[in-house]
Amino acid sequence: MTEQRSSQWYAGGDRNAYIHRAWMRRGLPDDAFDGRPHIAIANTASDLTPCNAHLDTVMESVKAGVFAAGGIPLNLPVVSLGETQVRPTAMLWRNMAAMATEEMLRANPIDGVVLLGGCDKTIPALLMAAASVDLPAIVVPGGPMKTGTFRGVPLGCGTDVWRLSEEVRAGTLSEAAFLQSESSMISSAGHCNTMGTASTMALVAEALGTVIPGLAGTPAVDARLLEYSHETGRLIVDLVAQQRRPSTFLTAGSFRNAIVALAAIGGSTNAVVHLLAIAGRLGIDLTLDDFDAIGAGVPLLVNLQPAGRFLMDDFHRAGGLLSVLREVRDLLDPTALTVTGRPLVDHLDDARIWDPEVITARETPLIPDAGIAVLRGNLAPGGAIIKPAAASPHLLQHRGRAVVFDSIEDLHARIDDPDLEVDADSVLVLRGCGPKGYPGMPEVANLPLPKKLLEQGVRDMVRVCDGRMSGTAYGTVVLHVTPEAAAGGALALVEDGDWIVLDVPGRRLTLDLEQEELNRRAPNQATLDGFAKPERGWERLYVDHVLGADTGADLDFLRGSGGDRVSRDSH
Ligand code: FES
Ligand code: MG
């Protein structure tokens, strides 16, 4: 057996080893320090991350599995991010959570780690951390909640909040009925039940190979989640013995599989920044254009909200991720391995589609080409993205006049103004919402439509923004415009009435202006005033070092791996 990393704390008879052992004993058996692996359970359970609050129960099952396999399990609460609670946006803290987790894994006597996540940013942050510390690691996604119903109709978390609130604004639903639906929206432990970012990142983590195949998508309240958790606890001990670290099996092929899965499930656009950031930690050369190239021709096979009809418990019942991947097996990298030590494609043979209304066969796709489109042009020289599957087909090629908002506050103040010069063909532009500008790149790109147009029956318009969009949202929304306005992007130069041309088939996003005119323009003062200028703390560090959305919005000094080197002793 190779010597454990933790033995550098615990082995031997000197004073320091004595200290490290003595304070840890507290009920651990005497042989706990005989060279067996010490496994951290990086646990994002928190009452303020309600989607992850049940992870302490999951942690107990992981612990039992680790003990059963001869390891020592150690609960390690880490920075947690509740998507609905944290302001200004959980994304501002993703890199902080990743950095704190990486550092605590490295600083402690840890040989391997089980990563417990759920709510949107938690799995990405944990995977970024695991990639950078490069210890053997397995993810247990906490699973989606069971579906709540209101007036007999199933509610999709997020998606139906947007839908119902638009109905109130359009005058087709009373405010009282809207508020009544509130207590039905969240009906159990677990994360959002739509194909939002949490569901997407759980499934994408499995496609990457970092989850036991078949686990992701298991509902939070399903007993099988605990069974898988126990199995994960046993498997991590084996991973440590095999020294199967992220750097030994995550390859460009793993990311190919993740991108194919992302398209076939109709997953959240947020997966783009998260996968780019994780790849950046591993030194894998993944680019924005890979999402377009690999996703091209991948069919949408999953009929889930926000793009479709069903919810995550339906998806699990219908066969789950493996049944989807089996349909697109020829598009997957056959060599990309999983935490089991076997290729992902080896786990697909027994998968079946049990409900073709929820998961459809390759021959009958919901959309033949579901990949994320990457747009370029003078308005987004670094790239922008759109999810055609969530957009209105009639708007995918569109030319319209810009109606510009300098900040989210400006938007809220004017969007419903009856005198706002806007019609259904206008292009709504919201800027100052990128990583640096807000800061943190919030999910505001699916800006609400003007009330007067909603009342006329308009349900979608072209929108352009340097921010992100909630994975539970839909619409013809151009996101992640890079460079962002606060980094000197052309988005800061757009004026009301300018013509903007969106051409998704041609992959173009252009401001119909001569370059000379663009060169002459200076950013609007109101735009500049809206950018964040933090003085201190994490926000300051973040704004000074965050990279663009086109590379995953990580901090410049966090890309790459620091490895699991053991620091000098503390005494
Ligand atoms: Fe936590 Fe949606 S708010 S997953
Ligand atoms: Mg979200």
Image (cartoon, rainbow, N blue to C red):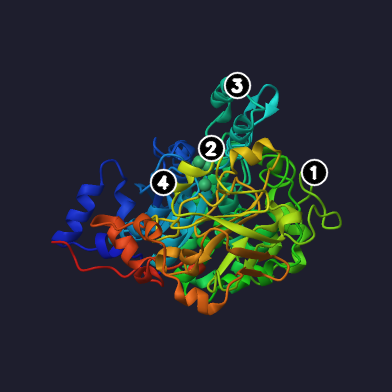
Find residue 337 and name its label: none
* Figure quadrant of residue 561: bottom left
Q: Secondary structure at mark 4?
A: loop
Compute the Cα span from label 4 to label 2: 14 Å
Residue wearing tag 4 = 81
Ranked by sequence position, the earlier of labels 3 and 1 is 3
Asked if labels 2 and 4 touch by Cβ distance under 8 angstroms, the answer is: no
Q: Please tell me which residue is depicted at 70% across the width and 63% down the height of the picture.
A: 346
From the viewer's perspective, is residue 173 above or below residue 126? above
Report the amino acid beneath label 1. Trp
Q: Nearer the viewer, mark 2 or mark 3?
A: 3
* Figure quadrant of residue 559: bottom left
The spot of residue 292 in percent (x, y) is: 66, 69
Compute the Cα span from label 3 to label 1: 35 Å
The spot of residue 70 in percent (x, y) is: 43, 52
Q: Nearer the viewer, mark 4 or mark 2?
A: 4
Q: How many marks?
A: 4
Asked if labels 3 and 4 touch by Cβ distance under 8 angstroms, the answer is: no
Report the amino acid beneath label 4. Leu
Residue wearing tag 2 = 190
Report the amino acid beneath label 2. Gly
Compute the Cα span from label 2 to label 3: 25 Å
The front one of 468 and 221 is 468
Residue wearing tag 3 = 177
From the viewer's perspective, is residue 204 above or below residue 49? below
The spot of residue 112 in percent (x, y) is: 41, 59
Name the quadrant of the N terminus. Answer: bottom left
The spot of residue 319 in percent (x, y) is: 73, 46
